[in-house]
Image (spheres, grey):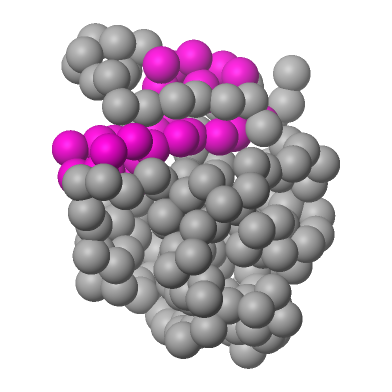
Amino acid sequence: MNRFDKLAEEWDLEPRRVLMAKNTFNEIQKKVSLLEEMEVHDIGTGTGLLLLNFVDKVRHITGTDNSKEMLDILANKLKQSNIKNTSLKLFDADIDNLPINSYDLTVSNMTFHHIQKPADLIKRIYSSLRSGGKICIADLETENGTFHSKQNLKGVYHFGFDKNEFLSWLEEANFINTTIETIFKIDKEGRKFPVFLAYGEKT
């Protein structure tokens, strides 16, 4: 059982997480016109705080995560709300393959700092997108390691990211029209932690 399995039951009780997911979705909408025929992939979907914003706007959304407990909670939410246009899959983003040419949009919210090799994942995301597909990744900008408490550092592989380096990973994966910008700051225990949204398009 990973640490997110243990946190799953209480995950949605933190208002900051709910607000952050909604803010991220709003910023994604500024970059991407959501269409009813779209196939969307949410990496690190967790309990679906980001995913649920998409369900009434696109044809189908696949949520992947490495926590079975998180996915079980999301599955229950979907069942209770009678949401049918979703698929959930247990997925290790550092190891597992992605289907080729399958999605119109891949999104992720606060997951990439838990990925050991994010540049490699970005390349796999590129291959998983259809022509004209888009990527939108939200995560922490470089921080000093205080965003996570010491007891929650297991599975944290990056203390945020340098925006220029992250942008270079998109470009190395052949994404075009790339942008990266600070979209909001997380207020946590008296400190403010900037969050970026990275964007790119597949030719």
Residue 71 is covered by the magenta coloring: yes
Q: Is residue 40 above or below residue 124?
A: above
> Quick check: can you spot residue 110?
no
- Which of these two is toward me, 187 or 115? 115
- Which of these two is toward me, 179 or 201? 201
Looking at the rendering, which quadrant does residue 159 occupy?
bottom right
Percent of width and height locating residue 61: 38, 37
Percent of width and height locating residue 88: 50, 25
Q: Is residue 65 above or below residue 135?
A: above
Looking at the rendering, which quadrant does residue 183 occupy?
bottom left
Q: Quadrant of the N terminus?
A: top right
Q: Residue at position x 38%, y 71% from top?
A: 185
Percent of width and height locating residue 107: 46, 55
> Quick check: can you spot residue 60?
yes
Highlighted range, magenta: 47-75
Percent of width and height locating residue 57: 19, 45
- Which of these two is toward me, 134 or 31? 134
Left or right: 107, with 14 as reference point: right
